[in-house]
Amino acid sequence: MLKKRDLNECHVLYELMADPAVFPFVRHKAGSVEEFIFLTKQTLEAEENGELISRTILDEWGNPIGTINLFDIQDNCGFLGTWIGKPHHGKGYNQLAKELFFNELFFEKNIQTIFMRIRKTNPRSERAALKIPYVSLANETRQDIYQQLNAVEDVYNLFQIERDTYYMYTARHSSLVEEAMEA
C-alpha cells in the first residue's frame, strides 16, 4: 500500500495531481511532468537529508494513486501532507495509508508529533481528519504553531497526533480485535 518514492511513477502521479479537484490541495504543485520529476528528485534528496519522509500510496494492484509525506521535520515533529487522485476518493485509501504511515513514523522513525494543517475551505480533508480517533484539534493547545500558520490570514485549522495517543489507541484497538476473534 505504501512504498518509497521513485521517478518511475512520476507520469501517473502527475496526471492524478493535475486534476482540478486535487491540485489546489497539493503542497508541491507542478505545472508539467518535467517539473513534477524535478520536484520528486528534490523530495528524494530532502528525504536523504532527513528533512522529510515521503511515500507513494498504492492501490491493491500496486498502481500509484497519491502521496503521503511528513514535511518540515524538526525536533521529532513534522507536518503531514497527503493527496490521492480523484478516481480513488472515497474508497478507504486515505485512512489505510495514514495508519501505515503513522506506524512507520512513530515506531520506526521516532517521530513524536504529527501536525496537520488543513485549510478551512477544504471540508473533505477536515472530515477525513476528524474520522481518525487519535487526532485532536490543536488550535488552542498549540497556539504558537496555529498563529504561525495563520499569521497573514486565518486560513488553517491545526490538528495533531501524539505518538503516545496513537500508541494507546492502537494497543487498545488490537486488544479489542483479539478479544472479538477469541469469542
Image (cartoon, rainbow, N blue to C red):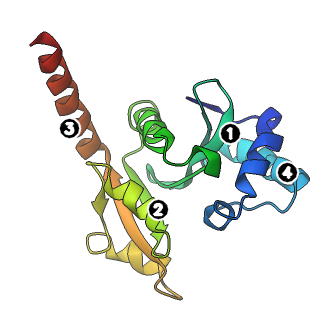
**Sequence-first tag of 4 and 3:** 4
Residue 38: assigned label: 4
Distance between the alpha carbons at the discs numbered 2 and 1 = 32 Å
Pointer 3 residue: 168
Q: Position of residue 96 (x, y in %)?
A: 44, 36
Given contact means CB atoms under 8 Å apart, are the residues at marks 2 and 1 in contact? no
Name the residue rendered at 79%, 60% in the picture: 30
| Residue neighbourhood size for the residue with mark 1, other residues' Cα within 10 Å, grouped as few (<14), some (14–19), many (≥20) | few
Name the residue rendered at 41%, 63% in the picture: 126
Pointer 2 residue: 124
Residue 48: assigned label: 1
Distance between the alpha carbons at the discs numbered 1 and 3 = 30 Å
The answer to whether 6 is drawn above or below residue 148 in the figure is above
Q: Is residue 56 left or right of residue 81?
A: right
User: Which residue type does callout 4 highlight?
Assistant: Phe
Residue sticking out furthest to the bottom: 152
* Disc 1 secondary structure class: helix
Residue sticking out furthest to the left: 183
User: Which residue type does callout 2 highlight?
Assistant: Arg
| Residue neighbourhood size for the residue with mark 3, other residues' Cα within 10 Å, grouped as few (<14), some (14–19), many (≥20) | few
Q: 15 and 97: which one is in front?
A: 15
Q: Position of residue 35 (x, y in %)?
A: 86, 56
Closer mark to the observer between disc 3 and disc 2: 2
Q: Is residue 170 visible?
A: yes
**Sequence-first tag of 4 and 2:** 4
**Sequence-first tag of 3 and 2:** 2
* Disc 3 secondary structure class: helix
User: Which residue type does callout 1 highlight?
Assistant: Glu
Q: Is residue 18 left or right of residue 75?
A: right
**Sequence-first tag of 4 and 1:** 4
